[in-house]
Image: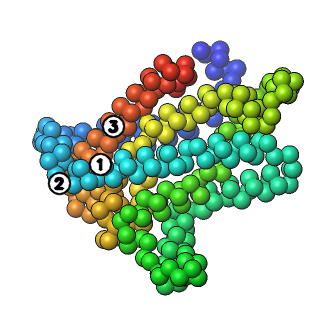
């Protein structure tokens, strides 16, 4: 090990900053999760506070909001997964078949650029476009005789707005992963498929998809493993009192408990419960994937 460090000390030096980052901001804070099992007192501190056992977990499970926030989080995440997972794959496969460089690069730039727009700007754009008075959606629908509708005031439309703005923002960026995998496909496979008389769709089905399947499986496992970890920022910005019945998810509920109500122990218990569910989903999906496809994260 010492000889390896002496020979490659530059590489080990580059590894130190990310290791310190994960140590300080990921692993050290895990110890503070003990707040979920204590009557946390700011003055006494974390470790001097009295133990509460599973009291805060019981409070959360018995809370009428438990079913609402868990079901909203799961349904929103599942909808987002179903809608956003296949689109980057289809986009990457389509771009891989394009022979015109200028058109291909233009499409990549147009689909990739929204990823660099901040969530606040995306939500502001969605609010303006869907505005019942000045929104583009109301103008277009009004042309066909449809009266203006306040889409964000209707709970049933919250998930659609959240998911499809997410798809628009991330599809191009996610497609880059699959384009990189497609770039590594052996050209000999295409030649063999051509000799066998395969058309473009058959090449995609029998060459491209099997070649990028390990990448697809890994991305799917990671996506399912974080299915309960819906992003807080967009949900909170799109949330209003009228759509609260479907927009209140675990992340926003935890924020209101911990920051607004200063109930740190209960908020930590809710967040810890969410993390345990994500971990169980990750382990389960990885085990199923290894059994079915032979590919997994480990």
| Residue appearing at x 67%, y 27% in the figure | 210
Q: Residues within 10 Å of mark 3 (few under 14, many from 20)?
A: some
Q: Residues within 10 Å of mark 2 (few under 14, many from 20)?
A: few
Answer left or right for 148 relative to 53: right
Residue behind mark 2: 64
| Residue appearing at x 45%, y 38% in the figure | 224
Q: Label 2 to label 3, Cα distance in Å?
A: 19 Å
| Residue appearing at x 32%, y 71% in the figure | 242
User: Residue 51: x percent and y percent?
Assistant: 13, 39
- When asked about the image quadrant of residue 189, the answer is top right
Label 1 SS = helix
Q: Residue furthest bottom?
A: 133
Establish if 109 lies above or below 296.
below
Q: Is residue 81 visible?
A: yes
Establish if 16 lies above or below 192.
below
Q: Nearer the viewer, residue 267 or 95?
A: 95
For marks 1 and 3, the one nearer the N-term is 1
For marks 1 and 2, the one nearer the N-term is 2
Q: Residues within 10 Å of mark 1 (few under 14, many from 20)?
A: some
Label 3 SS = helix
Label 2 SS = loop
Quarter of the image for the N terminus: give it.
top right
For marks 2 and 3, the one nearer the N-term is 2
Disc number placed over residue 277 in the picture, else none:
3
Q: Nearer the viewer, mark 1 or mark 3?
A: 1
Answer left or right for 134 relative to 71: right
Q: Nearer the viewer, mark 2 or mark 3?
A: 2
Residue behind mark 1: 70
């Amino acid at each position: 090990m010492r000889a390896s460090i002496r020979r490659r000390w530059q590489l080990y030096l580059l590894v130190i900053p990310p290791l310190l980052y994960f140590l300080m901001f990921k692993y050290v804070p895990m110890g503070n999760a003990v707040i979920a099992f204590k009557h946390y007192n700011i003055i006494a501190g974390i470790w001097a506070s009295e133990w509460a056992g599973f009291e805060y977990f019981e409070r959360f499970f018995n809370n009428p909001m438990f079913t609402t926030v868990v079901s909203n989080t799961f349904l929103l995440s599942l909808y987002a997964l179903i809608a956003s997972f296949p689109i980057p794959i289809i986009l990457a496969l389509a771009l891989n078949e394009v022979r015109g460089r200028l058109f291909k690069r233009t499409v990549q730039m147009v689909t990739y650029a929204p990823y660099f727009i901040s969530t606040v700007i995306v939500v502001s754009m969605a609010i303006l476009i869907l505005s019942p008075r000045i929104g583009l959606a109301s103008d277009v629908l009004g042309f066909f005789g449809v009266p203006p509708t306040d889409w964000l005031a209707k709970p049933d439309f919250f998930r659609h707005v959240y998911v499809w703005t997410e798809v628009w923002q991330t599809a191009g960026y996610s497609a880059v992963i699959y384009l990189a995998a497609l770039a590594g496909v052996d050209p000999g496979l295409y030649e063999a498929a051509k000799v066998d008389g395969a058309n473009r769709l058959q090449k995609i089905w029998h060459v491209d998809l099997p070649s990028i399947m390990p990448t697809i499986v890994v991305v799917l496992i990671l996506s399912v493993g974080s299915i309960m970890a819906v992003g807080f920022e967009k949900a909170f910005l799109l949330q209003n009192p009228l759509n609260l019945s479907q927009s209140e998810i675990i992340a926003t509920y935890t924020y209101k408990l911990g920051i607004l109500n200063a109930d740190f122990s209960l908020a930590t218990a809710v967040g810890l419960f969410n993390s345990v569910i994500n971990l169980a989903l990750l382990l389960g999906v990885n085990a199923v994937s290894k059994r079915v496809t032979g590919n997994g994260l480990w």
